[in-house]
Image (cartoon, grey):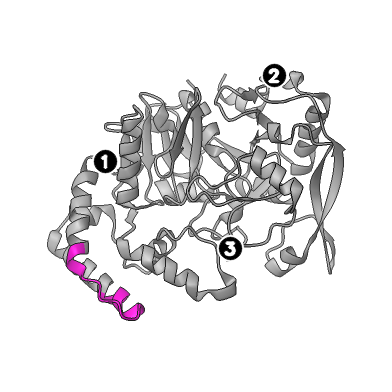
Amino acid sequence: MSKTNIAVLGAQWGDEGKGKIVDMLTPHFSTVARYQGGHNAGHTVYVQGKKFVLHLIPSGILHDGVTCIIGNGVVVDPQALFKEVDELARMGVTVNGRLLISEKAHVILPYHRELDVLSEARRGERKIGTTSRGIGPAYEDKIGRRGIRIADLLGDRAALAQEVRENVSARNRMIIDSTLDWKPVFDQIVQFGERLRPWAADVSLYLATTMKEGKAVMFEGAQATLLDIDHGTYPFVTSSNASVGGILTGLGVPPRAIGGVLGVAKAYTTRVGEGPLPTELFGELAERLRESGQEYGASTGRPRRCGWYDAVVVRYSARINGLDALALTKLDVLDELEEVKICTGYRTSAGTITEFPADLRILASAEPVYETMPGWSAPTKAVRQFDQLPPEARRYVTRLEEVSDVECAIVSTGSDRAETIVRKDSAVDRWFR
């Protein structure tokens, strides 16, 4: 078993296939720890043809004996968590004794969902395209220092009642004609707390002890770098730090705890929700990618916007996160295309740029600069050795490495965990020798 602690995070706009990569690598680790986001994330994992969709619980839960952690950087909807736990149990996966949730994690309450819907409606044409699951308002309460944490659910009932009463009162003032009664909310979350109690823990202490014992930890990200609240395409972003820095604050671990960083990127680009997507395709080709790649949100079912691989985006992610390697997913989706394109820069009113801009007006009007490469007719589906890929596919992967400034250590050629290439002498190969 590896003793290197590895971070696995998204290098594009999310939905890159992180769930599969985490699941595939989990046997090398004793613990998998999620550090940010909420149940707006959706990690889909296929194991021997069986489909698992996870939203809050790390993908490592599908391996016996592995401890899974939900960190303080995550906002937890108890109802969504219980539904996920019950569904896993129905499918033969038990979480008891293997799941820990930070007692410092903030709780999504019923009125957060209503506030999310209201906030999105008030934005008019500047809608973000959120999942309306209360994640943003829960983070707003956290930053506004009025949030309720799991520790609060387990502590003094009178103090909790006072917090809930004040929060519901504030919410009623924000929503016209709202008369939400605080007492049913209080009674409900007290019940939530009792079911959460066996899982609540000081996860920072647990991780420190685990690493001190020489056991390896994998840090699992949700969403992705271009949705990071600080480094993403603001304001069309999520409400947390999905990039590597979120690990430190979202789990309470020091920088030296991270021994390697693996970014996950598709062999093309997708995005859900609003915001600029420079390489976006429309028409028949977009539908071809969407249907072949089953590009529909695991959490919402929304169709994803599809485009060519954007090396400007991945190069930016490599810099922000200090990526040691990439896991390139869904290469097989590009099978049988006559040609494939790679965006290497953007033409703007101020000239051609090759670095990702902060000004979204520049990005929204940017015209992608493409390199065109021949496609391949031989299938890559289920290929497990890099040298067995079609020559054109190998050249495509090699070119992606060159323009993205990071090696492709893993190449995924299908949805099942076994349909994966781990390249010899890559960073990932060296981590797990």
Dot 3: element: loop
Residue 381 vs 181, above or below: the answer is above
Residue for badge 2: 385
The front one of 126 and 106 is 126
Q: Is residue 128 above or below residue 52?
A: below
Of the residues under marks 2 and 3, which one precedes in the sequence? 3
* Residue sitting at x 24%, y 53%: 151
The one nearer the camera, 374 or 224, is 374
Residue 282 on image: x %, y %? 74, 54
Which secondary structure, mark 2? loop
User: Would you call the spot at circle 3 few (<14 residues within 10 Å), some (14-19), or many (20 or more)?
Assistant: many
Amino acid bearing label 3? Phe
**Quick check: is 177 in the magenta stretch?**
yes
142 left or right of 283? left
User: From mark 3 to mark 1, how far is it between C-alphas?
Assistant: 33 Å
Mark 1 surroundings within 10 Å by alpha-carbon count, few (fewer than 14), some (14 through 19), many (20 or more): some
Which mark is drawn over residue 236? 3
In the rendered image, residue 33, in percent from the top left (x then y), is placed at 42, 39
* Highlighted magenta segment, given as a residue range: 169-184
In the image, residue 46 above or below residue 289: above
Q: Looking at the rendered structure, which numbered label has been put on residue 279?
A: none
Q: Position of residue 335 (x, y in %)?
A: 75, 32
